[in-house]
Amino acid sequence: MTPCVRLSDMASQRRRRVVVAMMEHETNTFSPVPTPLERFGRGGFGVPTGPEVVERFAGTGTGIGAFLDLAAEQGMEIVSPVAGNAAPSGKVDAAAYATMTDAIAAAVEAGCDACFLDLHGAMVAETTDDGEGTLLARLRRIAPDLPITVSLDLHANLTDAMIDNCTVAVGYKTYPHLDMYDAGRHAGELLVRALDGEIDPVMAWGSRPILAQTLRMGHDDEPMGPLIELARRHEAEGLLAASVFGGFPLADIWHAGLSVLTIADGDRARAEAARDEILDAAWAEREEFLFESRPLPETIAEAKGLTDGRDQGGPIVLLDHADNTASGGTQDTTAVLAEVLAQGLDRVAMFGICDPGVVGEMEAAGVGATIAVDLGGKVDMPAIGRSGEPLRVTGRVAALTDGRFTVTVPMGRGTQADMGPSGVLELTGAGGSTVEVVVCSRNVEPWDPGCFRSLGIEPTERRYLILKSRIHYRAGFSDISVRDIPCNGVGVTSSDNSLFTFEHVRRPIFPLDPHCQPTPEYGPAPLEEA
């Protein structure tokens, strides 16, 4: 078996050997949170390799889970070199990137008939601004004709290197990402059909200079929802796939921005026409991709004035979106918590503050003890000119756990969440109000209620939930909450572009350049080789 295999040679009935791997990271280049290799592990273990990949991800609600299930159904021989998935943070360490990409490249070089990759699409490493494109170009040099399929996140920043060096790529159509498995299944089935000679996938992609804000990308919201429905319509009318990528705006790289990828069966003109229709629709709604924040005291006062959320059937969610864990936030800023305590909102549960040091103090004191701690504020944020600001509080240690629980919502269903050693610190605010704060040791976004329930907090019994999230919280909390209120706190995931110095993103681009044209004259950025 050789690394170079043509699609036309793949129709035989012999058992196919396929490489199945995952390498996911959404990189916030403004984030001070480091991204070493160990961040790509989960559940208290290292990064899965070899047979462990199948054991941990087969049957789970993930892209790699879909690939593994499909390969097994097809009777394929599965080679699984690595499955790394890290919570968003700063640039991926050079050593971490090399370890994962070397493993995937070695598996391909050893010989295979196809490659299934679960990638994010917005990875920036110390050695390359295009983590996925650099990997795919490397694989293409090893095996010029190898069929490669890729599953991508809705927040991918597409590049020529990514699309030119794979056979099929499909993105999620939901945010929160409820269809990770579906997108992986879609991408995998298209490649299998191509291997069997049933289709001839032709991809067309393009972008518009829109640095869309993440809070405006929910699939149930304007303007992203109608764009996704337009993509679905094209698929219903015969297009093999159509994916809308909002892009990840906190990656200060040339390629950041909104894009569209379409796949037709041998008909490039059709793919290009559909791509352009969706891109034009996005450009027409570019103003709607901007989120306007309000002063924090105003939003907390509004929340306090609302009727008891429990009486309405569920809690009110206060979104601490400027410190969103799944966009690279430090998860340790306390501005929203401090304001809630000062204004005396009652029956509040918060997830969460990432502060391993405070967790250690809680463990030393034990459940039931009252302790005074400097909570959060341990990480400086030089990109936005802010130093860490701990909040001095006194509270009761209400619970302590190892921080592990199994995800039950569709987004990542069946995988192991790992908050690290964690606990609940009960605080008292103005007027004797009560606020329960989950303090954890690892960066984890609250999209599954298990982040509370595993620590003895039933979220449906609280009046307010403070969540360090933007949209993903809807995966597990939209059915139990009655309202959400975005709260403009402090952090490196703020929607205020004026806080950030963009030095590398292509220019002109909206909204940094409000009067730019939809197709400005610029050439592609060169691809770095790692």
Image: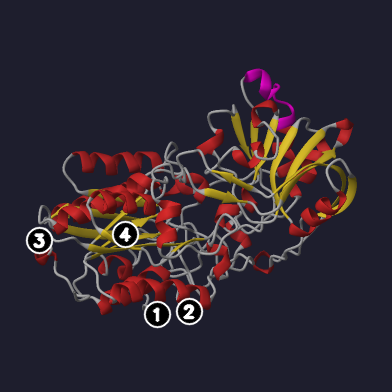
- Residue at x 65% of width, y 56% of height: 442
Residue on which disc 2 sits = 127
Residue on which disc 4 sits = 150
* Residues rendered magenta in the picture: 303-312
Q: Amino acid at mark 2?
A: Thr
Residue on which disc 1 sits = 528
Check whether the beta carbons of the residues at disc 1 and disc 2 lie within 8 A of each other. Answer: yes
Q: Amino acid at mark 3?
A: Ser
Q: Is residue 257 visible to the viewer in this orientation of the structure?
A: no
Real-space Cα separation, disc 4 to disc 1, in angstroms: 20 Å
Real-space Cα separation, disc 1 to disc 2, in angstroms: 8 Å
Q: Is residue 119 left or right of residue 391?
A: left
Residue toward you, 91 or 387: 91
Residue on which disc 3 sits = 12
Q: Circle 2 — which element?
A: loop
Mark 4 or 1: in front is 4
Q: Mark 2 or mark 4: name the one nearer the start of the chain.
A: 2
Real-space Cα separation, disc 1 to disc 3, in angstroms: 37 Å
Mark 1 or 3: in front is 3
Q: Circle 4 — which element?
A: strand
Q: Is residue 476 visible to the viewer in this orientation of the structure?
A: yes
Q: Circle 3 — which element?
A: loop
Residue toward you, 252 or 150: 150
Please check the rendered image and state whether residue 359 is part of the magenta-colored stretch, yes or no.
Answer: no
